[in-house]
Amino acid sequence: GAVVSQHPSRVICKSGTSVKIECRSLDFQATTMFWYRQFPKQSLMLMATSNEGSKATYEQGVEKDKFLINHASLTLSTLTVTSAHPEDSSFYICSARDRDQQFFGPGTRLTVL
Amino acid sequence: QQPVQSPQAVILREGEDAVINCSSSKALYSVHWYRQKHGEAPVFLMILLKGGEQKGHDKISASFNEKKQQSSLYLTASQLSYSGTYFCGTGSSSLRGSTLGRLYFGRGTQLTVWP
C-alpha cells in the first residue's frame, strides 16, 4: 500500500520561532497533498491543499502567511509554521493523494512553549 | 461542508455489531472511511465512489446512498482491535471535475470494544 512519511514526529519550540514539517510520499508520486490540523479528540480540519508546482489552496480562515506550504517535487510537501505561538500547538497531519484515495502520514505533534 | 457522524460514541462487547452513520448536506462524490487510534494517524479502511455501492473486507463493510447523501459503516462481530475513532471523509460532487479531491471529515465516532 501507499506509504506517507512525516518528519519530525514531535517538535517543541519557543514562541516566535518557525517550524518546518516535511511530508513525503515514499512509494508513489503525489501531485496533490493535503495538510490537516487536529486538536485533541477533535476532527481533522483541512488547512490547505498543496499542489506540485503551483501555489497552495488554503481553506477559509487559514492564514497563508502563517502556514507556508511548498510542494517542490512530486514526493515532497513542506508546511512551515512561522512565528509560532502556543495556540498553534496541535497535531499536524499530511495526506497524499493516490488516484481517488488519500493516505495519511503519521503526524507531527507541535508544542509551542 | 463537514459531514455529520452518529453516534458520537459506541461501547461494545467483543463479538457485538455496530453501525456508524455519516451524512452530508451537500451532494457527495465519494465517501472515505478511516480509523484512528490514539496518537496515531488515520488508517484508510475503504472508499465508496458510486451511489448504491457496498464494500467490505474482513468483517467491516460500508454502503453509500448517494441519493440520501449518506453512508454507513458496519462492523460485525467486533474485535478488540476495532477500538478507535472512526472518521468519514466526504468529497463533494461540486469538485468532481477538479483535481483537488479535497475531503472534509466528520467529528468522528469513538468505538470502544471490551472483552
Image: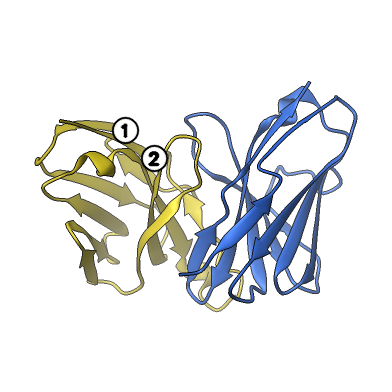
Chain colours: A blue, B yellow
Which quarter of the rendered picture does the C terminus of chain B lie within? Answer: top left
Q: CA distance from mark 2 to mark 1?
A: 7 Å
Front-lying residue, A68 or A103: A103
Q: Would you name the residue on which mark 1 appears? A: B8
Front-lying residue, B40 or A81: B40
Q: Residue at x 74, y 61 (%)?
A: A77
Q: Secondary structure at mark 2?
A: loop
Residue A100 versus residue A42 in the image, above or below: below
Crowding near the residue tagged with mark 1, few <14, some 14–19, many ≥20 C-alpha atoms within 10 Å:
some
Residue furthest to the top in view is A113
Q: Position of residue B31 (x, y in %)?
A: 38, 62
Q: Amino acid at mark 1?
A: Gln
Q: Which numbered dot is residue B72? A: none
Q: Chain of mark 1?
A: B
Q: Would you name the residue on which mark 2 appears? A: B108
Q: Secondary structure at mark 1?
A: loop
In the rendered structure, are the residues bearing label 2 and label 1 in contact, judged by CB atoms less than 8 Å apart? yes
Crowding near the residue tagged with mark 2, few <14, some 14–19, many ≥20 C-alpha atoms within 10 Å:
many
A63 with respect to B26 (left or right): right
Residue A19 location, quadrant: top right
Q: Chain of mark 2?
A: B
Q: Position of residue B82 (x, y in %)?
A: 26, 44
B113 with respect to B88 (left or right): left
Residue A7 versus residue B114 in the image, above or below: below
Q: Position of residue A83 (x, y in %)?
A: 88, 34
Residue A108 versus residue A56 in the image, above or below: above
Q: Residue at x 56, y 69 (%)?
A: A97
Q: Earlier in the sequence, mark 2 or mark 1?
A: 1
Q: Residue at x 24, y 54 (%)?
A: B72
Q: Position of residue A68 (x, y in %)?
A: 83, 51
